[in-house]
Image: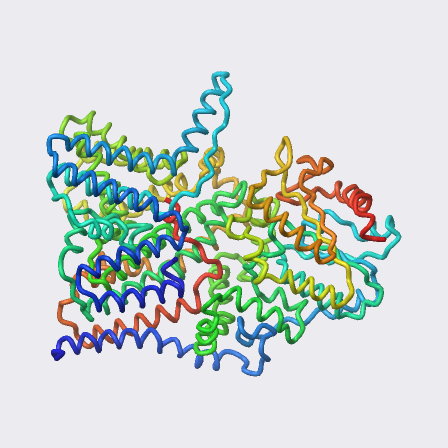
Amino acid sequence: MIGATARGSVLSLVAVLAGILILPTALRAVNRLLLDDTVKPSYLPTVETPRPREPFDDEAAAALREAQPEFVVIGDSMAGTRIDPRHLSRTSGRSVAGLFVAGTPVAYWYLEFKNFVAQNHLTRVRGVIFFFRDDQLTVRRQVATPMFDRVARDEEPELDALLAADRLGTFSGVHRAARALYQFDRTRQWLEPRLNHAPAALAGSDGQPEALLSAINAEIFPLEKLRHYEAADLPQADAASLDFYSQLDGSVLPEIVRLAQRSNIRLAFIRVQRRPMADGPPPQSDELTRYLEELKAYLTERGAYYHDDWGDPATPLSTYADGDHIVPAAKVPYTERFLEKHARIFQ
Amino acid sequence: MSFHSLAFLVFFVVVLAAYWSLPMRAQNLLLFAASYVFYGWVHPWFPVLLFATTFIDYWAALGMARAPERRRAWLWLSIVTNFGLLGFYKYFNFFADNVVAAAASVGWSLPEVVVRVALPVGISFYTFQSMSYTIDVYRGHAPARTRFVDMAAFVSFFPHLVAGPIMRATNLLPQFEQERRFSAAAARDATVLMMWGFFKKLVIADNVGVIANKVFALKDPEFFVLWAGVFAFAIQIYADFSAYTDLARGVAKWFGFDLIKNFERPYLATGPADFWRRWNISLSTWFRDYVYIPLGGSREGRGREVGNIMITFLVSGLWHGASWNYLLWGAYHGGLLVVSRLATAVWSPSPATRRWLRPLQVMGMFALTCVGWLIFRETELSQLVRDVQVSPGASTPLGASAGVYLFLLAGLYSVPLWIQDLWVELGGPDLAAAIDEPDAPTSKGRVIAQAGLCGAMMTAILTLRSQTALDFIYFAF
């Protein structure tokens, strides 16, 4: 028999647990007051609540349709500092387009490949060349942000399923239910900018927080002001992410390969060399070496071309700017060597 | 397995449900097994080391009890084994690098030896805790235990295994040897404390940690940006570490155990001695009792006292990591304490003076603590030299505005932390102390306030938690 005091204690525990679970539902009411309820569901409905999205970049898609390239090079700033598509077009005699957006993950490249190339009526396209670092093709920490808006269509079911499994893991159902119940993602949309702007309004002399924040990003924290290892953009891969086959299933790489096969597009993958040492290539762990061997086997078995720049004597430390970027003066020579070494891609 | 993961929530609920349905001895066995699962989640071979430490100390203590005339030898076995494991995993590369560098400076060329092993999470914490047992048995402060399961559960107890607080055998082991009863009131207060811990970690520490990481990624930060980053780090490390302690204490309380408070509002300290009475209390008192006092403490003259303080702080700095900056950080705090002791011996203000001096002392000590955090956070010595030389006069207007912005942003996120600390310092109720008195009569008002506070913290966690999840800082030690 439970005494009155014990019963009171149990009730008080239940009250505290109820407070934790029930009070956050007030966010729904606040959101209703402050946000537009007519927004459409996200293209990644299992990882995002409805939010106003930036438009798909129709102009970029139309420009590619007009150019009708035979080859498209996709990657982030690493590819952007190495390959000059115009020069490559001139020297190879093939029409080449480049899609380089700094700081983008492989999921973004997948959407570029799908929506700008494979499903964009590019009738002449024969091949797509991806530039990547280390384990970037199977990195599972995919970040869905408004950055994806410009390359995503209204529905992206394949990516949605992958991200849901990846980001939320075994408990993705719990995350989804909590997001639907509390709508905290929607609250973040209006709360976070306000929270960041309030100190900026106080710190800036002209009371324009947006301008101050842009200036801070552009002039205080630009890439060239970061320490070398930070400027590399991506940290070195840890051992867990270098287990190729355990990472593969949750990554977009199989989807890229499937899409290429369906669209009859040849794939090429070029692993760029990270910032070398003064006296040779960058160190490489046994795990990474094994990972790359498995990646190469996986891709070549599926008909893709694979090349690893590691140990390339033509890109010593002196050709590097910050991090893994190479200096502008080395771009054209790299492009020419690229064509020389990989002429068969363009045949 | 991190406290703020759904995997942990499932683990916690399952273990808890099983735990309260078992008799006491079986409860200990369950905690022993669950703790090894928890630790093995990080890396499957980590529990092997944990078991080795536990077994050797258990065996050494029994040896002391069975052969008191050889107890010194058993103690040495425990110390050498514990420090041997700790030294190998934590300090071998640091030692080898420095030997090679020192040899190179006199023209000798030695081959570089690098051991590529992962540092077992929490090794510094459980090694010290386990060693406290053998030292206490050696000193006669605690009897040697015959039940291995109790001892193993004490060393591996998962709530505080990887980042403390470091519990003494004399405090925690007896709790494993007595009946524990479930208290809903204690569970309620533990839940409030855990929510406060989650809030501090996910909303405060991780958000200001992003600011600190950005600043410390810069090659040449301007003065105001640099010190805003240091301020952010000061908030991050306090919120992060105290959050872990709160979570550990809350989780332990659900199982009927009391872990000690590890923080007492350290940024309101009035001087170095006061700071170390409030910061990482379990580690400071460990060093006091097992290093400083055995060295002679303050009993053998001023000169010896200064030496003992410096040795204790240098060892404490090295405990944090195998890097020169931690040693320097220890020396810095040792130096501050020595100076403050010497100053106190010369001048002792009257109570009236003390009262108006106090806010200035608090601000001064906080500034000195921040200088210490710069040393702690900056692992490159050349960069540290550059940082302390940077002048406010060389700042650009944008650099000054950026510094103010980052400072205000870090300050904004840390407002709840300051409010709670000032509130308690001025006599208000302490969220972290509530679990120590669960049997105190509970008014309806208090329960409603607790439920409201927990709901508000959960709302804040859902909406304001950092998008960048950072590990607990002290996992690295």
- Residue placed most toward the observer, B105 or A239: A239
Q: Is residue B460 above or below residue A225?
A: below
* Residue found 69% across the figure and 62% down from its top: A257
- Residue placed most toward the observer, B426 or B105: B105
One can see residue B271 in this view: no
Q: Is residue B185 above or below residue B225?
A: below
Residue A294's spot in the image, x, y percent? 62, 51
One can see residue A324 in this view: yes
The quarter of the displayed image where residue A182 is located: bottom left
Extreme residue toward the top, this view: B107
Which colour style is shown? rainbow
* Residue found 85% across the figure and 57% down from its top: A95
Q: Is residue A339 above or below residue B196?
A: above
Residue A71 vs residue A36: left or right? Answer: right
Q: How many marks?
A: 0
Residue B152's spot in the image, x, y percent? 24, 50
Residue B172's spot in the image, x, y percent? 19, 52
Residue A77's spot in the image, x, y percent? 67, 51
Residue A54 vs residue B8: left or right? Answer: right
Extreme residue toward the right, this view: A93
- Residue placed most toward the observer, A12 or B118: B118
The quarter of the displayed image where residue A38 is located: bottom right
Q: Quadrant of the N terminus of chain A?
A: bottom left
